[in-house]
Amino acid sequence: MKYPKLTKPPDMSDKDWNKVLLFSLVSFVFLLMLICTSIYELNFILKSKSADGEVVALNAGRGHVKVEFRTIDGKLIRYSQSGLVIYNVGDKVTVLYDPERPNRFASTNAIGALWTGTISLLFFTVVFSLATAASLKSK
């Protein structure tokens, strides 16, 4: 199978072509990271256990808090939570945690807490894809 050759359009300067290639590469890298992060998050959600938790302290404002919960076997866990979420001390939350490593992998069951990294990567993927498209249109 013969693939088309990637060549610069004749009416585009070398500088503009380099921008197109750079933005395309960055978009592709962000897309790969987005896919990997999404798979990781979905895997965590599928294998996690849930527990009732409570926000017990603010670390650096309402978006960076300490959460306490008990695992299925009664072990008390306290961890730091951040993300695109706002909590107050005393808020009741549902916590998802890895039963094998509850100290290391725990998160409140909120879209902003679970998917902050994925949402950020999606944003940058779209921005650099649009930059690629804009670079192709400017001649």
Image (cartoon, rainbow, N blue to C red):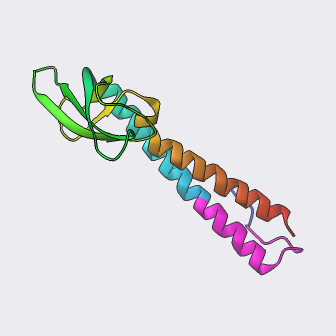
Q: Nearer the viewer, residue 64 or 118?
A: 64
Residue 4 locus on image (x, y percent)? 75, 61
Residue 107 locus on image (x, y percent)? 32, 34
Q: Which residues are magenta?
A: 6-26
Q: Residue at x 68, y 54 (%)?
A: 129
Q: Nearer the viewer, residue 1 or 17?
A: 17
Q: Quadrant of residue 20?
A: bottom right
Q: Residue at x 73, y 67 (%)?
A: 6
Q: Quadrant of residue 75?
A: top left
Asked if residue 17 is among those painted magenta in the image, a careful observer would answer yes
Instruction: Looking at this view, name the residue that lies furthest to the right.
Output: 11
Q: Nearer the viewer, residue 17 or 48?
A: 48
Magenta span: predominant SS is helix
Task: Check the picture and name the quadrant holding the N terminus.
Answer: bottom right
Question: Would residue 90 be found to the left or right of residue 13 on screen?
Answer: left
Question: Would residue 105 be found to the left or right of residue 5 on screen?
Answer: left
Question: Would residue 112 be found to the left or right of residue 17 on screen?
Answer: left
Whether residue 2 is visible to the viewer of this picture, yes or no, is no
Q: Residue at x 38, y 38 (%)?
A: 62
Residue 104 locus on image (x, y percent)? 21, 41
Please, is residue 18 above or below residue 38 in the view?
A: below
Instruction: Looking at this view, name the residue that lies furthest to the bottom.
Output: 14
Asked if residue 51 is among those painted magenta in the image, a careful observer would answer no
Q: Residue at x 87, y 74 (%)?
A: 10
Whether residue 55 is visible to the viewer of this picture, yes or no, is yes
Residue 18 locus on image (x, y percent)? 70, 74
Task: Check the picture and name the quadrant holding the C terminus.
Answer: bottom right
Tell how many labels. 0
Q: Nearer the viewer, residue 131 or 65?
A: 65
